Image: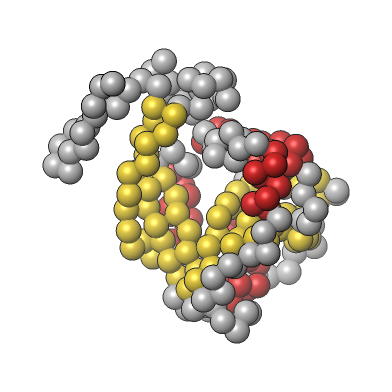
Amino acid sequence: MTSYPLSLDGYTDIPNDKVAYVVTYLEMTQAPEEGATARGDVTLERWTSVDPAEYKALYREIGETWLWFSRLRMSEDKLVEILGRPGTELYVPMRDGKRLGMLEIDVSNPHSVEIVFFGLVPEAVGGGLGRWLMQSGLDMVWARPDTRRVWLHTCTGDSPAAIHFYQACGFKPYKRAIEVADDPRATGLMPAHLGRHVPYLG
């Protein structure tokens, strides 16, 4: 087996069937001054008793351009187990009966709440819906008496606008990591033409 030692001062080769991302962790330690303003065109609804096929379809619609794959490669049983945990809460913005995105949070640690997934379907991007969704989520999280911190992470595989958006919402970066994973296009989980910002080398 070929060894690929990590260099912390230079370049590290990885196989063509892998992808590597720089991950940035961001946190917020006090509630933002600005909360969500009311919108008449969308509602935010808690999604319970989640059907795994419907979840994966929405997850793919939101994230396939950015190679979101972690939940797609999970078995339905594993996904149901995760989404059914007491600390997992899933919210979706709705318009005319259609889910326009997702806000998944993990409150299993009531003092340090994680925003696990956040995103909109392509047709809903723009018009301030993303900011409204984030502000609505933060309003809910900071309304909990035990919240001391909210955190999330993004990576170089995500939209380049994501990290700027999170900082504009009040999050501050505090840690970086490197993630290496099987390229979902190499495994057949996603078609090869997706993720042009991370070219497929297979």
Q: Is residue 85 left or right of residue 196?
A: right
- Where does the image place residue 161, in percent across and percent down from the top left? 46, 47
Q: Residue at x 39, y 30 (%)?
A: 19
For the question of whether residue 56 can be seen, the reply is yes
Q: Residue at x 41, y 61 (%)?
A: 26
Residue that extends furthest to the front in the rendered view of this protein: 1
Q: Residue at x 26, y 22 (%)?
A: 2
Q: Is residue 153 above or below residue 10?
A: below
Residue that extends furthest to the bottom in the rendered view of this protein: 145
Q: How many marks?
A: 0
Q: Which quarter of the image is occupied by the C terminus?
A: top left
Q: Which quarter of the image is occupied by the N terminus?
A: top left
- Where does the image place residue 142, in percent across and percent down from the top left? 58, 77
- Where does the image place residue 98, in percent across and percent down from the top left? 81, 46
Which color scheme does this rendered protein use?
secondary structure
For the question of whether residue 124 can be seen, the reply is no
Residue that extends furthest to the right in the rendered view of this protein: 96
Q: Is residue 160 left or right of residue 47?
A: left
Q: Residue at x 39, y 57 (%)?
A: 25
Q: Is residue 52 left or right of residue 130?
A: right
Residue nearest the viewer, comparing 88 with 105: 88
- Where does the image place residue 48, in percent across and percent down from the top left? 78, 56
Residue nearest the viewer, comparing 123 with 116: 116
Residue that extends furthest to the left in the rendered view of this protein: 9
